[in-house]
Image: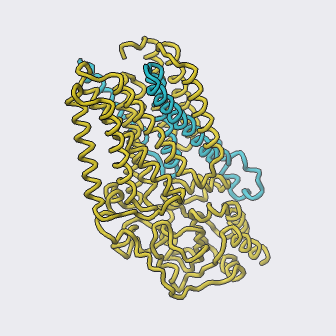
Amino acid sequence: MSGTPVWAQLTYLFAAVCFILALKGLSSPRHARQGNLVGAVGAVVACVIVFFYADLRHIVPIVVAVAVGTIGGFVGARRVQMTQMPQLVALFNGVGGGAAALVALLELSDAHGPGVARFTLVATAFTIVVGAVSFAGSMVTFAKLQELMTSRPVLFPGLPVVFGASLLIALALAVLTVVEPGSWPAVGGGVLLAVVGLAVGLLLVLPVGGADVPIVISLLNAFTGLTVAAGGYVLGNTVLLVGGTLVGASGTFLTKLMASAMGRSVLNILFGALKGGSTLGAGEVSDRPVRSAGPEDMAILLNYASRVIVVPGYGLAVAQAQHTLRELVDLLGERGIVVDYAIHPVAGRMPGHMNVLLAEAQVPYEQLKEMEHINGEFKQADVVLVVGANDVVNPAAKTTPGAPIYGMPILNADEAKQVIFLKRSMRPGFAGIENELLYDPRTTLLFGDAKETLGKLLSAVKAL
Amino acid sequence: MSEPVVWLTFFILSVFVGIEVISKVSSTLHTPLMSGANAIHGIILLGAILVTGTAHTTLQLVVGLAAVVLASLNMVGGFVVTDRMLQMFTRRRPVAPDPSADRSDGATSTRGRR
């Protein structure tokens, strides 16, 4: 901080305040967008003023690198489909963690030896390890969500041992870096520390099942925040410290909120699969009979109902069928049928993801009912229309203690008089377990692509 | 106060502020909030610029530039994608004349005015 002029420090204070206002704005629907803009302004201002006070060399390559990253980030963020949002957030989070680890490595290579304060070395080691964990972990989450690899928990015998060992090695290396800065080769040690950190990140996320991956993104987001905060201490920069800590603290809190929305603890999500094979999901694909029907029959069922609840899931978004669904719901509404959308907190692939997807299709906010508000109404519903959802209506969450989703609050679709499932196939959901509700005598299945099926359903209702 | 204690003070206070400002967020906004917070830690770009600007060796320069690219990806991409998401939450209010939205028209516009 000593080399920073007062005006620059005051500007950093301004940026830090922007970040606080950004988070505050982002947590209320009315101010969310302004909040995000305020945060962006703070970040840009903080990054620009550094060129005016610090005695920097290599300005041209730095500006080029910033331009490359900016264009890449901008194009990626603009082009991505809303359904792929979670992966993109994971990716951006990972590169942030990676950048922090590299910054700390450079600091270590420059400033080592007996002259450096012990506490600075602690923060440096922390940044390298946790940044690497965040980078590797985020890349695994990215691969899982992008379906570059299986979304099921990846386990191998001895994984807990290897994981524990790499944690210990990371700790030992960090201690060496801090205690023996003179005799210990700083740069080599730092690189080694980063490599072990990568291994820890990999082993941390591999055993996490697909449905829990979003929670892990949030947790890794908090990790990156703390890494950036520690980096701020190393560099003596207040805005990094405050911004990073804000994200670390709010991210940890948000992770807890999300986990409790799923009725799980964060530890259970991370290490549940290590305790035994049960969380793998039985994966039993049975050939028990199910009832399926054509769109015409289902149209009659819908048309003569007085209360319908729609349960949208990720499959709806994948098929890009949000708009067709909205048309169908609007048509039923015109015929005097009360229709609501029941939104599970983790519908889609990330908490709140479904709200974003339906907002994209311009579904009125008032029709989106959160789980706790609508769960009591399923008993009165004549028809529940489940479109591309599975795990969030799976009664196994209430009845099967061994299931990976056991304890997760679900939408009580099983209490309705009739259930219509729009499904692509009998393939189990993201959590990889079978859904008893599919075999219930009150359930009828309508197979096919969600968009096509909804289109047929829509024209069949119109014809009535 | 010694300098580490000053920093510790910043840290602890920021922790409380961080938790306090988001404590009442509804689950509707979890995704944009996560994404927005993700963009904020892209401020590591500032740190990356600082260390790259003081690089002495070519290797340091290369590593630093890599950090700058990654950090600006994080920061710019994060803010842009969050804005795109939030745009969808706010855009639908002025869309009231859409014929399919008659039923909720009244409710929607009152919301906007509130």
Which chain: yellow?
A
Tell me: A123 left or right of A7. left
Tell me: B94 left or right of A123. right
Q: Position of residue A274 (x, y in %)?
A: 31, 63
Of A212 and A136, nearer the camera is A136
Residue A306: quadrant of the picture: bottom right
Q: Residue furthest right?
A: A463
Q: Position of residue B79 (x, y in %)?
A: 56, 37
Quadrant of the image for the C terminus of chain A?
A: bottom right
Tell me: A151 left or right of A328. left
| Any part of residue A46 in sight | yes
Count of residue discs: 0
Q: Residue furthest bottom?
A: A289
Of A357 and B104, nearer the camera is A357
Which chain: cyan?
B
The residue sitting at 44% across, 50% down in the picture is A217
The residue sitting at 44% across, 38% down in the picture is A98
Q: Position of residue A25 (x, y in %)?
A: 51, 37
The residue sitting at 36% across, 68% down in the picture is A279
Q: Position of residue A71 (x, y in %)?
A: 63, 35
| Any part of residue B47 in sight | no
Colouring scheme, one of rainbow, by chain, secondary structure, one colour: by chain
Give above or below for A354 relative to A436.
above
